[in-house]
Amino acid sequence: MRARSAFAAVLALTAATAGTACAPERGAAPAAPATRAPAPAQSRTARPPQGPPGVLPRAGEVRPLPAPTGSLPPVISSIPTSRKVVFLTIDDGWEQDPGFVQQVRDQRIPVTVFAMRDAVEAKGAPDQAGGTARYVGAGKWDYFRRLRDAGAPIESHTLTHPDLRTLSAAAQRREICGSARLIGRELGARPTLFRPPFGSYNTDTLRAAKSCGMTAVLLWTATVQPGGKIAYQVPDKRLRPGDILLLHFRPDLARDFRVLVRKIERRGYRFGNLHAYLEAAVRPAADG
């Protein structure tokens, strides 16, 4: 009986304590209703991944390129690596398809752009291979600012797209340096890579490129045709590690780019960051 009374007393004391803890103090404002803790800011607003897009070279992966003759910029058509990476480049600037910028930005696909003034500013006849152009000059330099902001470096492809071998040394320098100054003024950074129109160059071209601040002249190993078809320049007609692919700003660019990306990924390749790989390939030769 005493044990039962003691147990009842403990229960009464617990209930009284709980009631005192839960009841608001007389005269005090009632407690605010419980609310769920806010989600972390990162989950509410997802931030895009940081850093340059594309695969970066591993230590010791890239073999040094042969040292260029004298002090002229090296001419490069592929990157010396055995890793299954390829590099996407795109020339001129005629068809300014917004869907292409969206793919580059949202999928973080590394692309190096070689811009030509007359194409960017829609001066002259556009390249309409593969269809009818719909976005010629649609954004002009603003379009290339969006590409830059999506992570695509904007490099030089001359002002007017001449065959440089037909020009004097002074005329070549005007084309290359004029392009570099224009890109620097419009986009805030001068280019350091140069691609000669048609892949046509001579020693005067290399001298002019150097005097205009270019560290390398970029060619290619395969071109991309309408429909995303790859035109190989090797007998076995297949991708190889280190290939540099050349695209153009042509009609249906967003569609063809999507086809190309899927095709390359199905073959087990990834997309490399061209500038990072060039730094790994060229610097050892220059330092040695």
Image (cartoon, grey):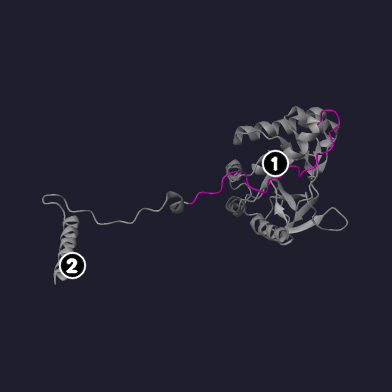
Q: Percent x, y for residue 220? A: 79, 47
Amino acid, disc 2: Phe
> The C terminus lies in which quarter of the figure?
top right
Q: Residues within 10 Å of mark 2 (few under 14, many from 20)?
A: few
Q: Nearer the viewer, residue 280 or 23?
A: 23
Outermost front residue: 2
Q: Secondary structure at mark 1?
A: helix
Identify residue type, mark 1. Ala
First to last magenta residue range: 46-72
- Where on the picture, by quarter, is residue 237? bottom right
Judged left or right of residue 108, residue 90 is right
| Residue found at the far right of this picture | 235
Q: Residues within 10 Å of mark 1 (few under 14, many from 20)?
A: some
According to the picture, the residue beneath numbered tag 2 turns out to be 7
Q: Position of residue 43 (x, y in %)?
A: 45, 53
Nearer the viewer's eye, disc 2 or disc 1?
A: 2
Give 235 or 93, whichever is nearer the viewer: 235
Indicate the position of residue 50 as horizontal and vertical percent values: 56, 45
- Which residue occupies 27% across, 57% down? 34
Q: Position of residue 200 (x, y in %)?
A: 83, 40
Q: How many marks?
A: 2
The residue that mark 1 highlights is 276
